[in-house]
Image (spheres, grey):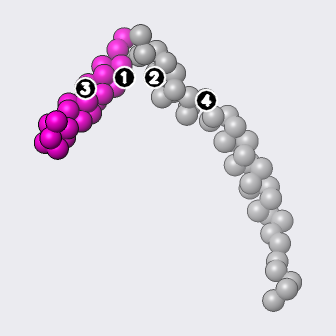
Amino acid sequence: MDYGTLRGLVALLILALFIIIVAWSYSKKRNSAFNNVANSIFDNDKVTKQDKQRHLDTDSKQETNKNV
Protein backbone atom coordinates (compact mmCIF):
# COMPACT_ATOMS: atom_id res chain seq x y z
CA MET A 1 0.00 0.00 0.00
CA ASP A 2 1.55 3.27 -1.06
CA TYR A 3 1.10 6.72 0.47
CA GLY A 4 -1.54 7.85 -2.04
CA THR A 5 -3.78 4.87 -1.29
CA LEU A 6 -3.46 5.50 2.45
CA ARG A 7 -4.40 9.15 1.99
CA GLY A 8 -7.42 8.11 -0.08
CA LEU A 9 -8.60 5.65 2.58
CA VAL A 10 -8.21 8.26 5.33
CA ALA A 11 -10.18 10.75 3.24
CA LEU A 12 -12.96 8.19 2.72
CA LEU A 13 -13.01 7.45 6.45
CA ILE A 14 -13.33 11.14 7.31
CA LEU A 15 -16.10 11.58 4.71
CA ALA A 16 -17.98 8.57 6.12
CA LEU A 17 -17.69 9.95 9.67
CA PHE A 18 -18.98 13.32 8.50
CA ILE A 19 -22.00 11.73 6.81
CA ILE A 20 -22.74 9.65 9.93
CA ILE A 21 -22.57 12.71 12.20
CA VAL A 22 -24.85 14.73 9.91
CA ALA A 23 -27.36 11.86 9.68
CA TRP A 24 -27.31 11.47 13.48
CA SER A 25 -27.81 15.17 14.14
CA TYR A 26 -30.73 15.48 11.72
CA SER A 27 -32.48 12.25 12.77
CA LYS A 28 -36.04 12.60 14.06
CA LYS A 29 -35.37 10.87 17.37
CA ARG A 30 -32.72 13.52 18.26
CA ASN A 31 -35.00 16.44 17.36
CA SER A 32 -36.69 16.71 20.77
CA ALA A 33 -33.37 16.56 22.64
CA PHE A 34 -31.87 19.29 20.47
CA ASN A 35 -35.00 21.45 20.87
CA ASN A 36 -34.79 21.11 24.66
CA VAL A 37 -31.16 22.16 24.65
CA ALA A 38 -31.83 25.04 22.25
CA ASN A 39 -34.66 26.38 24.41
CA SER A 40 -32.81 25.91 27.71
CA ILE A 41 -31.28 29.36 27.39
CA PHE A 42 -34.72 30.87 27.90
CA ASP A 43 -35.23 28.94 31.17
CA ASN A 44 -32.51 31.05 32.82
CA ASP A 45 -34.47 34.30 32.32
CA LYS A 46 -35.85 34.27 35.86
CA VAL A 47 -32.42 33.75 37.37
CA THR A 48 -30.80 36.51 35.35
CA LYS A 49 -33.49 39.03 36.34
CA GLN A 50 -32.79 38.29 40.01
CA ASP A 51 -29.05 38.55 39.41
CA LYS A 52 -29.47 41.89 37.65
CA GLN A 53 -31.44 43.28 40.59
CA ARG A 54 -28.82 42.01 43.03
CA HIS A 55 -26.09 43.60 40.90
CA LEU A 56 -27.93 46.93 40.86
CA ASP A 57 -28.25 46.82 44.64
CA THR A 58 -24.51 46.32 45.10
CA ASP A 59 -23.63 49.08 42.60
CA SER A 60 -25.07 51.72 44.89
CA LYS A 61 -22.53 50.68 47.56
CA GLN A 62 -19.49 51.29 45.42
CA GLU A 63 -16.15 50.65 47.07
CA THR A 64 -13.13 52.86 46.65
CA ASN A 65 -9.54 51.79 46.43
CA LYS A 66 -7.82 53.30 49.47
CA ASN A 67 -4.45 51.77 48.61
CA VAL A 68 -3.61 54.36 45.99
Quadrant assignment, res 46: top right
Query: What span is colored magenta in the figure?
Result: 1-28
The residue identified by callout 4 is 43
Nearer to us of marks 2 and 4 is 2
Nearer to us of marks 3 and 1 is 3
Count all numbered tags in the image, as a single digit: 4
Q: Answer yes or no: do the residues labelled 2 and 1 have beta carbons within 8 Å?
A: yes
Q: Residue at x 17, y 44 (%)?
A: 3
Q: Note whether 43 is above or below 63 in the view shown.
A: above
Residue 35 location (% of width, % of height): 46, 21
Earlier sequence position, callout 2 versus callout 1:
1
Q: Answer yes or no: do the residues labelled 1 and 4 have beta carbons within 8 Å?
A: no
Nearer to us of marks 4 and 3 is 3
The kind of residue on which mark 1 rests is: Ser
Left or right placement of residue 7 versus residue 63 in this view:
left
Q: Note whether 21 is above or below 44 in the view shown.
A: above
Nearer to us of marks 2 and 1 is 1
In the depicted view, which residue is nearer to us: 50 or 21? 21
| CA gap, disc 2 and disc 4 | 15 Å
Residue 5 location (% of width, % of height): 14, 37
**Of helix, strand and loop, which one carries label 3?**
helix
Earlier sequence position, callout 2 versus callout 4:
2
| CA gap, disc 2 and disc 1 | 9 Å
The residue identified by callout 2 is 34
Q: Residue at x 16, y 36 (%)?
A: 1
